[in-house]
Image (spheres, grey):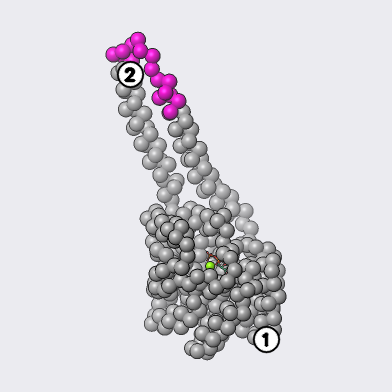
Amino acid sequence: MHYEPLLSVVIPLYNEEKIIDTLYSRCTTALNKWCSSYEIICVNDGSTDNTLQILKQYHERDKRIKVVSFSRNFGHQAAFLSGLKNSTGLYIAMIDGDLQDPPELLEQFFQKMEEGYDVVYGVRRKRKEGFFKKLSYKLYYIILNNISTIPIPLDSGDFSMIGRSVLLQMVEIQEKNIFLRGVRSWVGFRQFPFEYERDARYAGETKYTLKKLLTLAYNGIFSFSQFPVKILARMGFVVIVISILYSLYALYTKITQPDVPQGFTTLAIAIFLFGGIQLLALGIIGEYVLRIYDETRNRPHYIESEKYL
Ligand code: UDP
Ligand code: MG
């Protein structure tokens, strides 16, 4: 089958007006070197600055720049998803808009695809980010990898290139709280981890607030692991064993020392401890219930208000 263009590059953008010029020149310069035909799909995720206006100007001048604009901010993952669905290329690359993922590397990604891989994904060898952020990322990926039902490669982000057949499988997934890097690993096929150094953000501030980052982290864990809910049963089991042992001990002292009043401290500790454990358990179950609710409500991932394709 003949596909036009050869490559689609999907870029989510949220208030990135300072970056677009450099993004455009670096992407086009890098792609012109090797790629016979390409399109760059910029998804404006409800920016409140001039991102959309600037993108539209680029589209006027260069029709390879395509623009999809959301009616409000729906998040980075939703933006990628929309870009994937709107792409027409045989190969599809996903890169962040802040130039942390060097577009120059796409040539090498493509070579790997030609060697027969279906997915090439970036693995961050070094991160030029703060100590705390690096440490939390590391910990998070180690935990996620250990508890998830499928292996999710350590330190891999969304930076990747996939073939159209993989894309078709990925966009079939209807999950609402979508965690693309998990889905990309989940679909299987021949995958190649490509090590690279992640640059620092080119300009502006991170658009991932702590809250958004935590939501993403949560999605990874709750969508790809049954560990939280399974640990509840195990905790329950341990608690039962402990209480049986303790009851035996209490009975024993009751018999041997009938006159000594006992139990207040133990009682207080037990009430608070188990109150806490039960709330935690309810919270974890609630998280899964919420997800069921989200899925059944079946709202779209995003709303596209303007499109220049
Ligand atoms: N982004 C987006 N919607 C959001 C948050 C971020 O489209 O709600 C885009 C952002 O413009 C950037 C990319 O997603 O192109 C990655 O975001 P950012 O660099 O701020 O995240 P970080 O690298 O700090 O985790
Ligand atoms: Mg970034």
Instruction: Identify the residue shown where x is 47% and y is 30%.
Output: 272
Residue occupied by mark 1: 61
> 71 and 129: which one is in front?
129
Q: Is residue 57 magenta?
A: no
Instruction: Identify the residue shown where x is 34% and y is 32%.
Output: 241
Q: Is residue 177 above or below residue 260?
A: below
Instruction: Identify the residue shown where x is 42% and y is 42%.
Output: 232
Classify residue 300 by image quadrant.
Answer: bottom right
Looking at the image, is mark 1 or mark 2 nearer the viewer? 1
Marks 1 & 2, CB-CB < 8 Å contact? no
Instruction: Identify the residue shown where x is 40% and y is 24%.
Output: 266
Pointer 2 local density, CA inside 10 Å: few below 14, some 14–19, many at least 20: few
Is residue 302 toward the left or the right of residue 140 in the image?
A: right
Residue occupied by mark 2: 251
Q: Secondary structure at mark 2?
A: helix
Query: What are the residue bounds of the magenta stretch?
Result: 254-270
Q: Indicate the position of residue 178 as horizontal and vertical percent values.
A: 53, 61
Q: Indicate the position of residue 216 as horizontal and vertical percent values.
A: 52, 58
| Label disc, if present, on residue 224 of the rendered structure | none
